[in-house]
Image (cartoon, grey):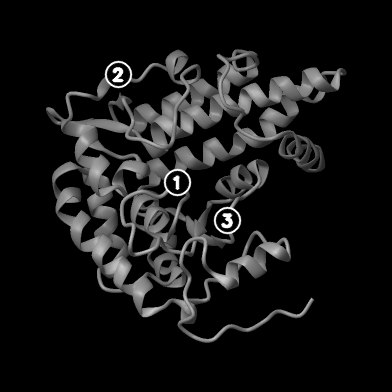
Amino acid sequence: MTATTFPPGVGLTTNAAPFIEQARSHGDVFIRQPYELYSPDNQDTWRRLYARIRPRWERYANAKFLQGVQDLALDPSAIPKLEDVNHFLAPLSGFAARAVSGYVPAYVFFDCLRQRAFPTTVTIRDGQHLDYLPEPDIFHDIAGHVPMHTDKAFADVLVRFGEFAREAAAHVRGIPDEPERLARLESILRAMARFFWFTIEFGLMRQGGEVKVYGSGLLSSFGEIEHAVTSPLVQRYPVRLEWVVNQGFEIDHYQPLLFVVDSFDHLFTLVNDLHDWLKAGRLDNVAPGEPAVNETDLKSFLAAGAAAA
Ligand SMILES: [Fe+2]
């Protein structure tokens, strides 16, 4: 199929980007960042998002994140070029931001992390609605996630997490009954999605006598980063793995429950514990909730796992 070319500045706005629609219609998950297509409005949206959240990072973000922002030399006035970000990132942790067209199948997502690549959205939210966005955009992915990837210990947590895909597929492979095999895999993926949500996306960390933010969902939200640390409406508990893997969550409002880790070493220990629990079958039947992935995705997960074995 011939690719259409789009005029420079046509826009890469979330849910209104012809380049992305074309990539998806061709089934392309990994894409280039067509930088020339960002519109002046898109660039203005980045500037406004960055300018208003910067003071909140200074107050609420953990020290590693602030160092990461500095190390990446993020430009407050222009949407980052992924190749520039990666130029600074590679020597620090070996990680890279890799452009994607949108939804990444579960197995591919994990496997990307295993290979030290982070699936990165290139579109940016509509400038009329800076606050609420159910799907990721480049501000969430680059300003929220990637500064954490400059830290070697944190990057190693992601790689360890990414290795679970193969292990989860291997764990259920011997189950002869297909519905049972899919049900166990779905439970494992639900547990892993919960772990990812309550740590990588919405985690809090003790730092000195304070609680600081390291979760990217919070780091990219002007409203919730402050709410997470200061609101009496938020329950903040020391992280417990048995709670996290059994705790459901909703994505369309501020989180009422957050978990606090002691350090990145602590987080790494938790990922290793999660691995042990997977092997021991302790994730085979976690508390019910929203399925992490649909049946098609489960089947392609198993097929990909089998191909990698
Ligand atoms: Fe995210």
Q: Nearer the viewer, residue 205 or 236?
A: 236
The C terminus lies in quadrant: top right
The residue shown at (44%, 24%) is: 270
Return the disc, 2 or 3, that comes first in the chain's sequence: 3
Q: Say whether residue 179 is left or right of residue 129.
A: right
Circles 1, 2 touching at the beta carbon (< 8 Å): no
The residue shown at (19%, 33%) is: 229
**Residue underneath mark 1:** 134
Task: Say which mark, if any, is on residue 114.
Answer: none
| Number of marks present in the image shown | 3
Q: How far across and down, in percent of the image, does residue 45 sit?
A: 31, 67
| Amino acid type of the residue tagged 1 in the rendering | Pro
| Amino acid type of the residue tagged 3 in the rendering | Gly
**Residue underneath mark 3:** 102
The residue shown at (39%, 63%) is: 126
Q: Is mark 2 within 8 Å of ligand 1?
A: no
Q: How far across and down, in percent of the image, does residue 243 sit?
A: 43, 15
**Marks 3/1: CA–CA distance:** 12 Å
Q: Nearer the viewer, residue 3 or 108?
A: 3
**Marks 1/2: CA–CA distance:** 27 Å
Disc 2 crowd, CA 10 A, few/some/many (<14, 14-19, 20+): few
Q: How far across and down, in percent of the image, does residue 47 sit?
A: 26, 68
What element does badge 3 sit on? Answer: loop
Q: Nearer the viewer, residue 87 or 297?
A: 297
**Residue underneath mark 2:** 238
Circles 3, 1 touching at the beta carbon (< 8 Å): no
